[in-house]
Image: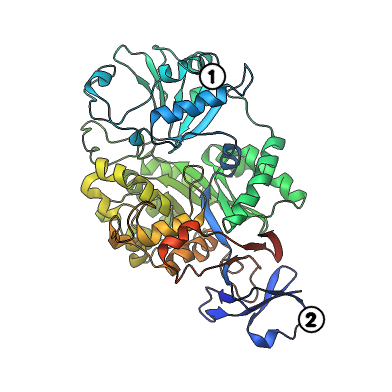
């Protein structure tokens, strides 16, 4: 048995909001209280007045991609030149046949096209965001294939060597729901949007399961230090295989909800997999589908055009009827749905599909599943209350708001009033589950908490009211979205998300109280100690 004492414990349990001691036995909390627990014969951990919270969960992460990405070039730079410098440095260190891999570039941060540069593209693009090109990479990596994913993960920037390996020429047609960006002569520029990325990524040697095992094992420590004890993962088969190996060896020390790509629905259907199958360490989540793209490359599906781009309403991968047919097949075998939707049109189509699905569940005596929308980045006013009405979880990433706010203002204009609208969703009665979408953003939940309570970027004045300040949350509301909300989305709220008798002993120890400290202190906050299932998996010196 373990006894945590002399602590300021925020339980998130309405029946007992605060305590100073926790008694833990066999990975489970058996008592919550104060000095009356001190006579226990348990091993004592005196926390010296430090703060204890339930462990935090990232409700949307790409675990394999994040873990492997720790070895990639960091392309999140303020200038194109700096990004190219980092690529050039990597070229010096790899073998002749190696792929050069990187992630994080965002052309919206790299200034605007001049009229001279813009003439190389179809149409009048002067004043638009500066897209890089294959030739930029060719000058520093003429012999190595280069594949750099955008921060949004909805675009890739490649060089000529990579285009040749993929067989992409001026005659290559755009794939369905994707685009090969071309210059005025019809030649590929090196920018691939949405499904066009697959033309090159399919040529990249896939990591072995063992390599993914090792990368996740190493990434766990980073996530524990950030205060994470659980994640909801959205990567694919190899990641699932790696997680199973780690779990079998007793080395998986995060709690993982593993979502199933919609491409694998047929296999899951044949096997009869159900949402919630597994245990509290590794369990099946929902079926993940995509309805649109992203804001960064302006492929999120919108009702009205992007400002300054009268012909562009984004890319809608499927309408509500198509999605309903997929969701119906999943529901028949006990699988819930989780759907990527960013633009207002995309969210509308998903909500229409979920409305049909709720009726189908009732008519056929099926379970009332915990369906989700991932991102919910902008809603049409008519749809603002529908998530609550349909009991659909708003799985959102607060850090997206502060990262994207200038792009959102620029391309969505007045529509941003219902962008990243957490307060609106709570007011209507929807449930929030917060994450990061790492590696799109940092998985550090304290950066997400800061974004949720301030709606400011880290470099903004503390006096700033924040972007669309009406949508701010209190610290408690934001923490609950990383704990209780994430647990509810996974169907584990009776065992996780709170510190109460009968709950699993997942907790973090903090030097300061995020409920009361100045918001700016959240930016540097991390866990001093992290416990999962009664085991200290991370402790600072």
User: Residue 151: x and y, percent?
Assistant: 44, 38
Of residue 4 and residue 486, the one placed in the foreground of this image is 4
Q: How is the image coloured?
A: rainbow
Which numbered circle lies on residue 41? 2
Relative to 147, 281 lies left or right: right
**Residue where numbered disc 1 is placed:** 145
Residue in view at x 52 percent, y 53 percent: 444
Q: Secondary structure at mark 2?
A: loop
Q: Quadrant of residue 10?
A: bottom right
Taking the spot 75% from the left edge, 69% from the top edge, the residue there is 26
Earlier-in-chain disc, 1 versus 2? 2
Place of residue 214 in the rendered image (x, y in percent of width and height, measured from the top left): 70, 41
- Residue 483 percent coordinates (x, y): 53, 64
Residue 66 figure quarter = top right
SS state under label 1: loop
- Asked if residue 172 is positioned above or below residue 249 in the image, the reply reads above
Q: Is residue 266 visible?
A: yes
Q: Would you say residue 361 is visible in this rendering?
A: no
Distance, label 1 to label 2, CA atoms, is: 62 Å
Q: Tell me the crowding category of disc 1: few under 14, some 14 to 19, or many 20 or more residues within 10 angstroms, Cα based.
A: many
Which mark identifies residue 498? Answer: none
Residue in view at x 61 percent, y 50 percent: 222
In the image: residue 391, left or right of residue 21: left
């Amino acid at each position: 048995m373990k006894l945590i004492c002399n602590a300021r414990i925020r339980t998130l349990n309405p029946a007992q909001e605060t305590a100073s001691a926790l008694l833990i036995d066999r990975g489970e909390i058996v008592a919550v209280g104060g000095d009356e627990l001190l006579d226990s014969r348990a091993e004592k951990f005196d926390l010296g007045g430090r703060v204890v919270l339930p462990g935090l969960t990232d409700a949307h992460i790409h675990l394999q991609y994040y873990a492997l990405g720790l070895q990639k070039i960091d392309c999140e730079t303020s200038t194109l030149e700096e990004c190219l410098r980092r690529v050039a440095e990597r070229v010096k260190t790899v073998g002749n046949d190696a792929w050069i891999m990187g992630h994080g570039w965002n052309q919206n941060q790299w200034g605007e096209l001049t009229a001279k540069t813009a003439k190389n593209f179809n149409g009048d693009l002067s004043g638009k965001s500066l897209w890089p090109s294959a030739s930029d990479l060719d000058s520093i990596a003429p012999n190595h294939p280069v594949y750099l994913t955008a921060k949004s993960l909805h675009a890739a920037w490649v060089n000529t060597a990579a285009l040749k390996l993929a067989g992409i020429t001026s005659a290559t047609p755009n794939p369905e729901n994707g685009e090969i960006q071309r210059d005025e002569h019809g030649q590929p520029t090196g920018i691939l949007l949405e499904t066009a990325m697959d033309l090159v990524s399919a040529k990249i040697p896939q990591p072995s399961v063992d390599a993914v095992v090792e990368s996740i094992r190493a990434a766990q420590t980073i996530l524990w230090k950030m205060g994470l004890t659980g994640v909801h993962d959205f990567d694919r088969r190899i990641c699932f295989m790696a997680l199973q190996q780690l779990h079998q060896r007793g080395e998986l020390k995060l709690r993982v909800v593993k979502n199933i790509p919609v491409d694998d629905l047929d296999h899951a259907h044949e096997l009869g997999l159900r949402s919630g199958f597994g245990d509290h360490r590794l369990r099946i989540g929902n079926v993940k589908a995509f309805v649109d793209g992203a804001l960064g490359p302006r492929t999120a599906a919108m009702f009205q055009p992007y400002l300054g781009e009268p012909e562009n309403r984004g890319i809608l991968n499927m309408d509500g009827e198509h999605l309903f047919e997929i969701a119906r097949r999943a529901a028949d075998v006990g699988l819930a749905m989780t759907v990527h939707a960013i633009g207002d049109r995309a969210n509308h189509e998903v909500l229409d599909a979920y409305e049909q699905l709720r009726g189908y569940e009732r008519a056929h005596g099926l379970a009332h599943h915990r369906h989700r929308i991932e991102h919910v980045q902008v809603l049409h006013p008519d749809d603002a209350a529908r998530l609550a009405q349909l009991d659909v979880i708003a799985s959102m990433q607060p850090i997206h708001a502060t990262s994207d706010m200038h792009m959102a203002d620029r391309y969505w204009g007045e529509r941003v009033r219902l962008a990243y609208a957490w307060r609106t969703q709570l007011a209507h009665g929807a449930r929030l589950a917060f994450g990061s979408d790492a590696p799109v953003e940092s998985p550090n939940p304290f950066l997400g908490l800061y974004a949720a309570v301030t709606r400011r970027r880290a470099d903004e004045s503390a006096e700033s009211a924040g972007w669309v300040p009406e949508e701010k949350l209190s610290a408690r509301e934001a923490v609950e979205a990383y704990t209780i909300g994430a647990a509810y989305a996974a169907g584990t709220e009776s065992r996780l998300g709170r510190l109460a008798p009968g709950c699993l002993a997942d907790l973090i120890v903090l030097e300061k109280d995020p409920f009361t400290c100045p918001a700016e202190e959240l930016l540097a906050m991390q866990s001093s100690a992290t416990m999962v299932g009664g085991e200290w998996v991370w402790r600072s010196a």
